[in-house]
Amino acid sequence: MLLRVLRDNPRAAVLLVVLVAANLAAWAWALVSFHHSTALMAASLLAWCYGLRHAVDADHIAAIDNVTRKMMQQGKRPFGIGAWFSLGHSSIVVLASIAIAATAAAFQNDMDWFHDVGGVIGTAVSACFLLAMALVNLVILRGVWRNFRQLKRGESLSAEDTDFNGGGIMSWLFRSTFKLINKSWHMYLVGFLFGLGFDTATEIGVLGISAASASSGMSIWSILVFPALFASGMALIDTLDNMIMVGAYGWAFNKPQRKLYYNMTITGTSVVVALFIGGMEALGLLADKFNLHSGMWKWVDALNENLGNAGFIVVGLFIGCWIVSMLNYRWKGYDSLVVR
């Protein structure tokens, strides 16, 4: 699927080459700076792996998937969503590493206030954005389900009806949300705000490496190797994820009846994932700020502690839905349905 996307879309191929080159450049920087130290090269590998791992966090996957779907519904092929989201997200880590390097131990000891404030902002933005996009996709799902039922009954359905046109009261209610993200680069700000929370072990790990290096007297130039490796690794994986989603949705968008059927199944999955991840983040924020840790809140705490690993499940879920949807579509012969 990925090879087909790269073959048919030169822009996607160029973007992937640029990101691979960025990763190679970051590693060349690390070799030049730390070739004399095995320990620092090991720390560099750890920072890069942190970036690869952070890219499959559940909130990343859900945000990129929902926005990819929304923009493809508008007739676009958004290959830069993952890259822009990652750049915004990693900007926070880069800026924090610079601040740590500039103020060394003093800033390191006074990091709690920034973590608390940023945690509230980052988690709130993440939860609200995912819930808003879930509502947008719920509106899309309603229209797609209605049109697909018409198609199965053999009723007349124009090609225009296979696109979500946003009619009715629900469109009016969510019109501003539909306009929230219209270009790939808009995701930079979303990623930036998501990153304010420093709410994962990977981000904290990179800052810890930077802080330890600053305390030992390492220069800012050398310290920036770690966030550069983190950012390049995360951008590569998020972009690959974005391209795979575009490829999966591209199969569905080749024919009107495919668009209806596949949209119906995968949009439902997107809504459930976004509502679950966004809801858990919102409940986790409430539990933390109001010190709620008994009863159902204990369950909420446990889920939020393992939310990072949910990203792997979400990726598998989307791939599984695409495969099952495609096989079921062909088995039932929906390609033979006529759009009139």
Image (cartoon, helix red, strand yellow):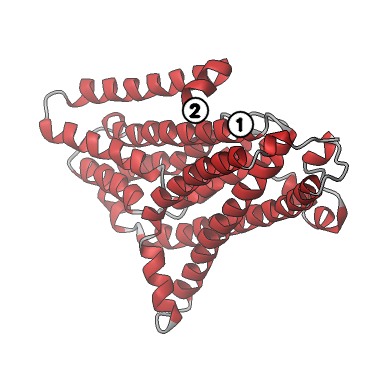
In the image, taking residue 6 as reference, residue 329 lies left or right, namely right
Residue 251's label in the rendered image is: 1
Amino acid found under the numbered disc labelled 2: Met
Q: Which residue is located at x 54 percent, y 40 percent?
A: 327
Give the image location of residue 182, x and y in percent: 70, 37
Residue at screen point 69% across, 30% down? 76
Along the line of sight, the residue nearer the viewer: 147 or 173: 147
Which is nearer the eye, 16 or 337? Answer: 337
Q: Position of residue 12 (x, y in %)?
A: 54, 22
Categorize mark 1 by other alpha carbons within 10 Å: few (<14), some (14-19), many (20+).
some
Tell me the crowding category of disc 2: few under 14, some 14 to 19, or many 20 or more residues within 10 angstroms, Cα based: some
Measured as percent of width and height from the top left, residue 223 is found at 28, 35
Task: Using the image as rendered, state which of residue 99 and residue 185 is in the foreground.
Answer: 185
Q: Are marks 1 and 2 in contact (CB under 8 Å)?
A: yes
- The number of numbered discs placed on residues in the rendered structure image is 2
Q: Report, in whole angstroms, how far the alpha carbon at label 1 lies from the one at label 2.
A: 9 Å
- The residue lying at 40 percent from left, 37 percent from top is 234
Instruction: Say which quarter of the image contains residue 226.
Output: top left
Mark 1: amino acid = Trp
- The picture places residue 202, in percent across and down from the top left corner, at 32, 48
What number is the disc on residue 1?
2
Q: Can you tell which quarter of the image residue 210 is in?
A: top left
